[in-house]
Image (spheres, rainbow, N blue to C red):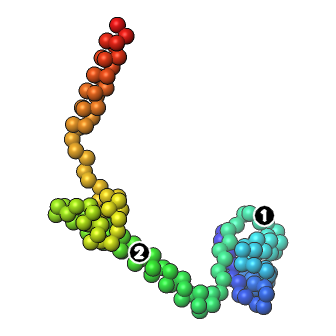
Amino acid sequence: MTYTAKCVRSGDWWAITVPEIKGVFSQARRLDQVEAMAREAIALMLDVDPHSFDIEVQPELPQEVSRAREARSALRKAEQSAEEATVTAAQALLAKGYTVRDAGALLGISPQRVSQLAPKKATGGSSSKTSKGAGAGFQQEQESAAA
């Protein structure tokens, strides 16, 4: 079962209530101590193991905090949108024949970042054949030198 630990700042303390269980009250000095204090109070009231249930801490947020959280959430969404638009633009520019340097200059990012966002497709296996051929030649030279 999950219990809710509602907490409100009261002076230098957090006043804790658990609405699901009448009469469960506690307090904590810091917000990071609320869960432990609520867990202990619930366990004592119900005479159960303190680890046999879950707790959801719900602090009452000052208006400034709510506003800051909303702004940070909007920022994350805007950053994600900007990243998606940049990837699309980088891919489109490279497909139209722009160089990585020109695409970077147009997008205001480094050429290396353009390469990360829109990597070139690997060419067919020609480079692997060259590597194998070179390796085989090197191996034959080594065998000839040993003989």
Identify whether 128 is placed above or below 52. above
Q: Residue at x 54, y 85 (%)?
A: 68
Which quadrant of the view contains residue 96? bottom left
Q: Count the marks: how many?
A: 2
Q: Disc 2 versus disc 1: distance between alpha carbons?
A: 44 Å
Q: Residue at x 76, y 90 (%)?
A: 10
Quarter holding the N terminus is bottom right
Q: Residue at x 27, y 63 (%)?
A: 101
Amino acid type assigned to the residue bearing label 2 in the image:
Glu
Amino acid type assigned to the residue bearing label 1 in the image:
Asp
Which quadrant of the view contains residue 91? bottom left
Quarter holding the C terminus is top left
Identify whether 136 is placed above or below 100. above
Left or right of 6 in this view: 73: left
Q: Position of residue 128 (x, y in %)?
A: 27, 34
Q: Which residue is mark 1?
A: 49
Which quadrant of the view contains residue 29? bottom right
Mark before the other along the chain sequence, 2 or 1: 1
**Secondary structure at numbered mark 2:** helix
**Secondary structure at numbered mark 1:** loop
Q: Is residue 90 visible?
A: no
Front residue of 109/56: it is: 109
Residue mark closest to the camera, 2 vs 1: 2
Front residue of 124/37: it is: 124
Q: Is residue 135 visible?
A: yes
Q: Which mark is residue 79?
A: 2
| Mark 2 neighbour class, 10 Å CA radius: few under 14, some 14 to 19, many 20 or more | few
Query: Is disc 2 in contact with disc 1, using a CB cutoff of under 8 Å?
Result: no
| Mark 1 neighbour class, 10 Å CA radius: few under 14, some 14 to 19, many 20 or more | few
